[in-house]
Image (cartoon, grey):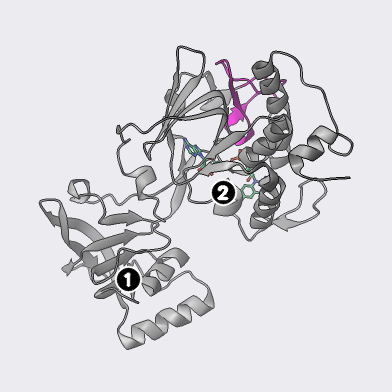
Amino acid sequence: MSLSNATTHAFLTQQQPAVETDAIIIGAGPAGLFQAFQLGLQGIRAQLIDALPHVGGQCSQLYAHKPIYDIPGIPVCTGMELVQRLETQIAPLQVTRHLSQQVQTLQALEDGRWQLGTTAGAIFHTRTVFIAAGVGAFVPKTLKVPGVDGLETGQLHYHAQQPDMAAGRQVLVYGGDEEAVAAAIACSADAARTVLMHRRDSFNAEPAQLQKLQQLRGSGAVEVLIGQITEVRHGNGRLQAVQWMDGEGDEQMLAVEQLLVYQGISPKLGPLTDWGLALERKQLAVDPATLATSAPGIYAIGDIVSYSGKKRLILCAFHEAAMAAFAAAEYLQGSKPLLEYTTTSARLHAILGVSH
Ligand SMILES: Cc1cc2nc3c(=O)[nH]c(=O)nc-3n(C[C@H](O)[C@H](O)[C@H](O)COP(=O)(O)OP(=O)(O)OC[C@H]3O[C@@H](n4cnc5c(N)ncnc54)[C@H](O)[C@@H]3O)c2cc1C
């Protein structure tokens, strides 16, 4: 799966039939995942959208294998384990996910609902929106050299995880992290030529992967070049070659048909600040009692929000998810929802698919 659609392509104007729903959650980090659970308990079916090809936000992207010690009731777990537990918790709710796409537009409809548009061209009509966008959408750092803008689509790929475009092609994998090494190994199986280029002859990957790379370098299946791309050359939009600078500072040319770039992924607030919602120092201003933003039916939780005393902690985001779900249930149903316990409520047992 490639992140390129979510980032480099312009917002597609091609209209698809709108997805109709009661609740959209923007961001599938820990806050967004638990928001889906809390909405589920209120009987509100939500759909999740995230720019990443996987759920988990910062937990899976920035510290998947590092320990967290301050989740209530879990003395220690890694970022990835927490995400897996949240996934298990929401499994009975069968929450639809729309991954690898960034929400670009948010507009009010005349009937009081909201319309969202994503970089994948999807359109959503929803009565409520929950913005759990954290520190922003995780998008890949793009290649900023002359010639990139003129390329047709389908030849430049950012953080492609299962490269399936290499067969019979001259492929250049650009980067030095685990994903770049894995891509070079995968491409070497059926590419006409696989080149792995990095600033230095040192790669950041698991020992088994590094050993495999060494083997493939030895057999000539993967060629490693030490240097940096300085220009992309194309003819009528078709990628033909890259100009690159080697360790000695000399410019060289390399024929390339498919360019796979792995320069890291970083969060960007992106279009969110243009949606007309009240902001406080680039964060969404909310009422801490309801997590309501300045627009009716739009709530925000987690790292993206600002209110007096706000702490950017996962446990605070979990509390906010519960408060927002109660507020949204009242907004949608017109009356205050009852507070029911998961221990004793038959209604909640039915929602969660548990029996006593
Ligand atoms: C190294 C590190 C260690 C940490 N350790 C702890 C800890 O021990 N305990 C603790 O409580 N907290 C810890 N934190 C903080 C914690 O990770 C954050 O508070 C938490 O991730 C916030 O969750 P969130 O869901 O609000 O945002 P995020 O985790 O940032 O998730 C937001 C998601 O929204 C998506 N998104 C944003 N905008 C859009 C858009 N327009 N369209 C589509 N998708 C979008 C992003 O791609 C992302 O996946 C740590 C953070 C770091 C970096």
Q: Which mark is residue 149?
A: none
Spot occupied by residue 15 in the image (x, y as percentages of width and height): 33, 31
Spot occupied by residue 72 in the image (x, y as percentages of width and height): 80, 45
| Quadrant of the image containing the C terminus | top right
Residues at circles 1 and 2 in contact by the CB criterion of under 8 Å: no
* Beta carbon of the mark 1 residue lies under 8 A of ligand 1: no
Q: Secondary structure at mark 2?
A: loop
Spot occupied by residue 181 in the image (x, y as percentages of width and height): 42, 70
Residue beneath disc 2: 55
Under mark 2, the amino acid is: Val
Spot occupied by residue 302 in the image (x, y as percentages of width and height): 63, 35
Label 2, residues with CA under 10 Å away: few <14, some 14-19, many ≥20:
many
Residue beneath disc 1: 196
| Quadrant of the image containing the N terminus | bottom left
Under mark 1, the amino acid is: Leu
User: Magenta region's main secondary structure?
Assistant: loop
Q: Secondary structure at mark 1?
A: strand
Q: Nearer the viewer, mark 1 or mark 2?
A: 2
Q: Quadrant of residue 185?
A: bottom left
Tell me which residue sits at (79%, 35%) in the image: 348
Res 159 visible: yes
Task: Report the image quarter containing ligand 1.
Answer: top right
Tell me which residue sits at (25%, 56%) in the image: 155
* Beta carbon of the mark 2 residue lies under 8 A of ligand 1: yes
Label 1, residues with CA under 10 Å away: few <14, some 14-19, many ≥20:
many
Mark-to-mark CA distance, 1 and 2: 28 Å
User: What is the magenta range?
Assistant: 286-309
